[in-house]
Image (cartoon, helix red, strand yellow):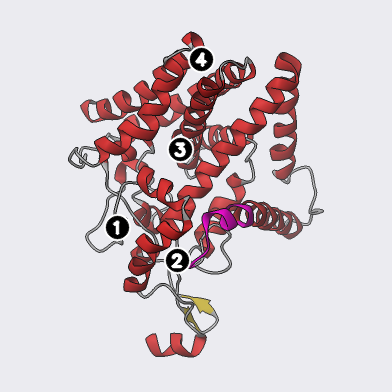
Amino acid sequence: MLALVPYLVALGLSVALLIAGAVFDGAWDFASFIWMAGVVAVLDHILPEHEAPPSEAAAKTLTVILAAIHFPMLALAVWALAQGGPLWNWIAYFSAAGLFFGQIMNSCAHELIHARGWIRRGLGRWTYITLLFGHQTTAHPGIHHSAVATPEDPNTARYNETWWRFVLRAWRDSFRKGLALEKRRQRAAGRHGWNWRNPYWQYLLGAAGSLALAGTVLGWSGVGAYIALCLLAQSQLLITDYVLHYGMRRVRVGKRWEPVGPQHSWNAPHVVTNLLTLHAPRHSEHHAHPSRGFEELRVGADVPLLPYSLPVMVTIALVPALWRKVMNPRVDALGQGRIVRPTEAACVA
């Protein structure tokens, strides 16, 4: 149980500061943002890597507790933003809440949709639905994991593709390809593609119901705050994908792509970010073993490493020229920067 303490401290502080900002306003609006956007990045680069994972039971309990916290925390954040207030305070709290839901709660939902058991998977699905991103429940395991590091994956950033181009393409194509996958599944079962069992009904109606609830309780300011917060949280999820797969390409061997390997994801071992995101930056091992809990993930000696922690890399990604300067030489060094033609793939094989 002691191994869970660092996670509880890091996550508990994030939750407490976001609540304080909603309830007390003033300087507390800035405290959560400073912690999430500044202090975490500094601590990542001065603290040693954390190597004492919790037990499987403790890890499961942590994800369920986090998912249960998500729903009242989301309601509180939307309420606080709907109240308005001084512009810079509002921007600081909005940014902190976007980081919280886009990095911490997304990581929890991501862990849960890969989990065994309908309760935990349901919690992950509804976390995404209330972030107006329900299709991630289908697109992430169904499209991204099978097509990662190929042109067929919406969430693998292409070499030289800027974040600003990537985000729109990734959102649109993950929604579209996820829907096509679910329609194929329904047809394979002998049903119409839009049969009521298609989970996209749940994604869409759940999102509509969430928006209607926000509007009923908080009016149009609540709807606006809710949509804006969800868009910021979704962008955090997508920029993480952008950073962790930028420029990666699997080799085409005949009619198939080579198996996914550790060389097809970027990784970051930095301690505090790994605590807050449930080891999401240990990404190569996650793709190698998608059903493995976060407590089992490691950063192997042979995996590509990002030069800085994930929060720093996310910030760099917002500036395309700086991003290319930092990352393109690293992609080139891995031989990942160009799409290998089938004839070349045969030679490599």
Q: CA distance from mark 1 to mark 4?
A: 37 Å
Q: Which residue is denoted by mark 2 in the rendering?
A: 247
Q: Which residue is denoted by mark 3 in the rendering?
A: 103
Q: Which residue is denoted by mark 1 in the rendering?
A: 305
Q: CA distance from mark 4 to mark 3?
A: 19 Å
Q: Position of residue 86 (x, y in %)?
A: 56, 17
Q: Amino acid at mark 2?
A: Gly
Q: Which mark is residue 22?
A: 4
Name the front one of labels 1 and 4: 4
Residue 223 lies, with reference to residue 120, above or below; the image says above
Q: Position of residue 133 (x, y in %)?
A: 62, 40
Q: Earlier in the sequence, mark 4 or mark 3?
A: 4
Neighbour tally class for label 2: few under 14, some 14-19, many 20 plus, Cα within 10 Å = many
Q: Earlier in the sequence, mark 2 or mark 3?
A: 3
Q: Earlier in the sequence, mark 2 or mark 4?
A: 4
What element does badge 1 sit on? loop
Q: Amino acid at mark 1?
A: Leu
Question: Who's the residue at 75% across and 34% down the image?
Answer: 205
Whether residue 164 is in magenta: the answer is yes
Q: Looking at the rendering, in which quadrant would you find the C terminus?
A: bottom left
Q: Position of residue 38 (x, y in %)?
A: 34, 33
- Viewer-side residue, 159 vs 348: 159
State the extent of the magenta-drawn residues as a range: 159-169
Q: CA distance from mark 2 to mark 4?
A: 39 Å
Q: Amino acid at mark 3?
A: Gln
Question: Who's the residue at 31% across and 48% down the image?
Answer: 297
Q: Earlier in the sequence, mark 1 or mark 3?
A: 3
What element does badge 4 sit on? helix
Whether residue 76 is in magenta: the answer is no
